[in-house]
Amino acid sequence: MVAGSKVIIDISRFQGHPDFKKARAAGIVGVIGKATQGLNAHDPVYAANKAAAKAEGLLWGAYHFGTGSDPVKQAEEFVEVAAVGNDELLVLDYEDNPGGTQMKLPAAREFIKRVAELTGRHPGLYSGHNIKQDLGNTADPDFAKCWLWVAQYDSSPTAPQIQKSWPKWTLW
């Protein structure tokens, strides 16, 4: 953990219904819950976990696991299901999809643009090697509007090849 950092966890149906009171007591300050994946795949514990986490005073955010299906429809469904307030985060999970088709960079761009149109703000982008490979050392003005949640399991995050779009990461 980076000194002085705040701890935020991400959850999905695989964690069931965590004890958010214990999480808060352990120093967790926020939760980012999976709301949707592709089209028509809604996390069945999302709404209950959102309510329970917020009842314990935890910050909340929602993420969407992108797939190869229509990115505009994915964005619209995500925004509807996530039902986030202005004080809650929105995130696109842009990574390998071992069980199906992968969201490609142009589709991710359409997704973030549609989320911004619907909500008035750009989502965060959760990614690691995928965004590094797909963007390379290219500055991208669309993705640069998103904050970066680095998916990297190491002693500290590094992303030198994407620093033209993100000079710093927001979450790791």
Image (spheres, rainbow, N blue to C red):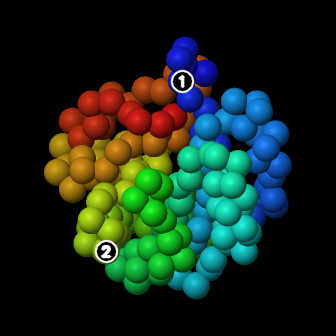
Do we see residue 93 in this rendering? Answer: no
Residue 157 in percent (x, y) is at 48, 27
11 and 65: which is toward the camera? 11
Residue 118 circle label: 2
Verify CB contact (< 8 Å) between mark 2 and mark 1.
no
SS for callout 2: helix
- Within 10 Å of disc 2 (Cα), the crowding (few <14, some 14-19, many 20+) is some
Determine the CA span between mark 2 and mark 1: 31 Å
In the image, what residue type sits under mark 1? Answer: Ser
Residue 71, located in which quarter of the rendered image? bottom left
- In-image side of 69 versus 54 (left or right): left
SS for callout 1: loop
Q: Residue at x 79, y 44 (%)?
A: 21
Q: Residue at x 53, y 70 (%)?
A: 82
The N terminus lies in which quarter of the figure?
top right
75 and 90: which is toward the camera? 90
In the image, what residue type sits under mark 2? Answer: Leu
Q: Residue at x 39, y 43 (%)?
A: 148
Q: Up-down: is 42 above or below 13?
A: below
Q: Which comes before the other along the chain, label 2 or label 1?
A: 1
36 and 87: which is toward the camera? 87
Residue 153 in percent (x, y) is at 60, 32
Residue 44 in percent (x, y) is at 72, 74
Residue 41, located in which quarter of the rendered image? bottom right
- In-image side of 62 versus 47 (left or right): left
Q: Residue at x 21, y 56 (%)?
A: 142
Residue 22 in percent (x, y) is at 82, 39
Mark 1, residue position: 5
- In-image side of 80 versus 35 (left or right): left
